[in-house]
Image: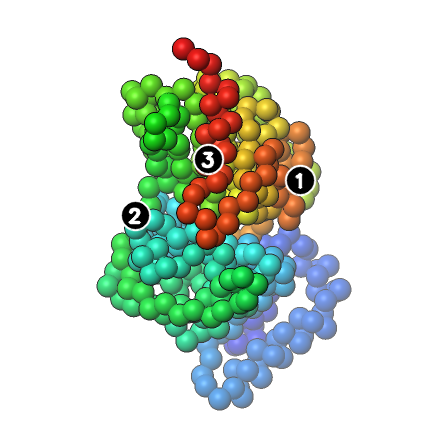
């Protein structure tokens, strides 16, 4: 059997190779830290009040490496969490029915999904998740929070949120029973009394391209003459899906440029087979990531008019790597840039027409403005 000391040294050497460093160079420059790490492992194994396995300590070391990046989007995914993420991207899971993101270093509700338990309970966009059951969520990583909120249908979860109303922050508690959440990423209908298609995208997943094609085909039978693409409260999702959606709305050419730390460049381009309708895009402070790729491409190419408020400002791309034992590593690997080369990370995208949407307003002022703009663009028959 290998000694604990030898197991730890082997694990360290493997980590060095994974990070692309030469073993000899790292050992020379960091021998004191390595020696300290080995000593800490030994002290914990021999002296901690509860038994601790080497596997448990190695998992903790891996988490610590990722957490040292100080990046809310990079995280070590234990097997259960890795599986949950795969399920999420397929569009069906057991949970509450909320999209969450990181805003001002807090886990924040981007949007509850209509008709889900969270929506019916009264959870709102902008709510900060403070506690999940009995665990403090203020400094929790986002994937851990998602894991805690998901679970078998019929089971109950308690979440405490902080909601800002009229300048005052109030804690609110919700006891919610989980259900199977099947998330259609695209919904569409005609604006009442107008030849205008209102197409809402709630997220970008592997089904979005097909759902969008089906929605447009169905609405074309009703002979619409203008499109409102609604990306409000859309937290993003798959990069490929963002390219597929943008391809419907921008002319032939660049959709997005992705650059990694080494200067390698990847591009996604439109094939030029776009829809030929006047276009308005609705965005707000919770339009993030893939939503901003689409909105940025439309704005830079002049393909449509952006209406609403400044977007979220997530201009980085994460890659998911499968590790041994069915675990995974999600890390930020690149930045993306709009067709004109704009870096929107932590900046967001300013709409062409700024329209605030007061929470207490019974009217959708942003949608009304979009309809007004489109009516001025639609040619009379």
Kindly state the secondary structure of the residue where label 1 is placed.
loop
Give the residue drawn at x 39%, y 53%.
Answer: 112
Residue reaching furthest to the top? 381
**Residue under numbered circle 3:** 368
Q: Distance between the residues labelled 3 and 2?
A: 29 Å
Residue 82 in sight here: no
Q: Is residue 45 left or right of residue 203?
A: right
Q: How far apart are marks 1 and 3 (CA)?
A: 30 Å
Q: How far apart are marks 2 and 1 (CA)?
A: 33 Å
Kindly state the secondary structure of the residue where label 3 is placed.
helix
Residue 3 in sight here: yes
Mark 1 or 3: in front is 3
Residues at circles 2 and 1 in contact by the CB criterion of under 8 Å:
no
- Given residues 352 and 316, the one toward you in this image is 352
Give the residue drawn at x 45%, y 86%.
Answer: 50
Q: In this view, does 91 lie to the left or right of 284?
A: left
| Residue 184 quadrant | top left
Dot placed on the residue nearer the N-terminal end, 2 or 1: 2
**Residue under numbered circle 2:** 182
- Given residues 169 and 265, the one toward you in this image is 169
Dot placed on the residue nearer the N-terminal end, 3 or 2: 2
Where residue 236 appears, x then y in whole percent? 48, 44
Residues at circles 1 and 3 in contact by the CB criterion of under 8 Å:
no
Kindly state the secondary structure of the residue where label 2 is placed.
strand
- 47, above or below 279, in the image: below
Crowdedness of circle 1 by 10 Å Cα count: few (<14), some, many (20+)?
some
Dot placed on the residue nearer the N-terminal end, 1 or 3: 1
Where residue 241 appears, x then y in whole percent? 45, 35
Where residue 104 appears, x then y in whole percent? 60, 59
**Residue under numbered circle 1:** 343
Give the residue drawn at x 62%, y 79%.
Answer: 39
């Amino acid at each position: 059997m290998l000694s604990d000391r030898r197991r730890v040294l082997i694990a360290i050497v493997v980590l060095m190779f994974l990070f692309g460093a030469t073993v000899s160079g790292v050992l020379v420059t960091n021998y004191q830290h390595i020696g300290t790490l080995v000593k800490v492992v030994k002290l914990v194994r021999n002296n901690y009040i509860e038994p601790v396995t080497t596997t448990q300590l190695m998992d903790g070391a891996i988490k610590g490496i990722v957490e040292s990046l100080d990046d809310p989007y990079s995280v070590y995914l234990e097997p259960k969490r890795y599986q949950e993420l795969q399920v999420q991207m397929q569009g069906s899971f057991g949970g509450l029915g909320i999209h969450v993101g990181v805003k001002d270093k807090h886990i924040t509700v981007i949007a509850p999904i209509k008709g889900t338990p969270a929506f019916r309970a009264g959870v709102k966009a902008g709510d900060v998740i403070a506690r999940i059951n009995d665990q403090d969520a203020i400094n929790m990583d986002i994937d851990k929070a998602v894991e805690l909120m998901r679970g078998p249908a019929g089971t109950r979860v308690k979440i405490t949120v902080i909601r800002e109303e009229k300048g005052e922050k109030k804690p609110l508690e919700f006891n919610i029973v989980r259900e199977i959440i099947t998330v259609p990423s695209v919904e569409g209908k005609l604006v009442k009394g107008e030849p205008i298609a209102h197409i809402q995208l709630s997220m970008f997943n592997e089904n979005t391209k097909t759902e969008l094609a089906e929605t447009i085909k169905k609405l074309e039978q009703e002979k619409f003459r203008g499109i409102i693409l609604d990306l409000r409260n859309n937290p993003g999702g798959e990069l490929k899906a963002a390219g597929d959606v943008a391809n419907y709305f921008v002319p032939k050419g660049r959709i997005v440029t992705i650059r990694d730390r080494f200067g390698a460049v990847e591009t996604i381009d439109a094939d030029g087979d776009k829809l030929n309708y006047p276009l308005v895009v609705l965005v707000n402070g919770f339009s993030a990531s893939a939503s901003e790729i689409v909105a940025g491409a439309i704005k830079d190419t002049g393909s449509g008019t952006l209406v609403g408020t400044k977007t979220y400002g997530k201009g980085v791309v994460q890659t998911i790597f499968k590790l041994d034992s069915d675990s995974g590593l999600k890390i930020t690997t690149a930045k993306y840039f709009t067709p004109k080369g704009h870096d929107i990370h932590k900046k967001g995208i300013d709409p062409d027409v700024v329209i605030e949407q007061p929470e207490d307003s019974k009217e959708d002022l942003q949608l009304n403005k979009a309809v007004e703009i489109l009516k001025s663009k639609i040619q009379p028959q």
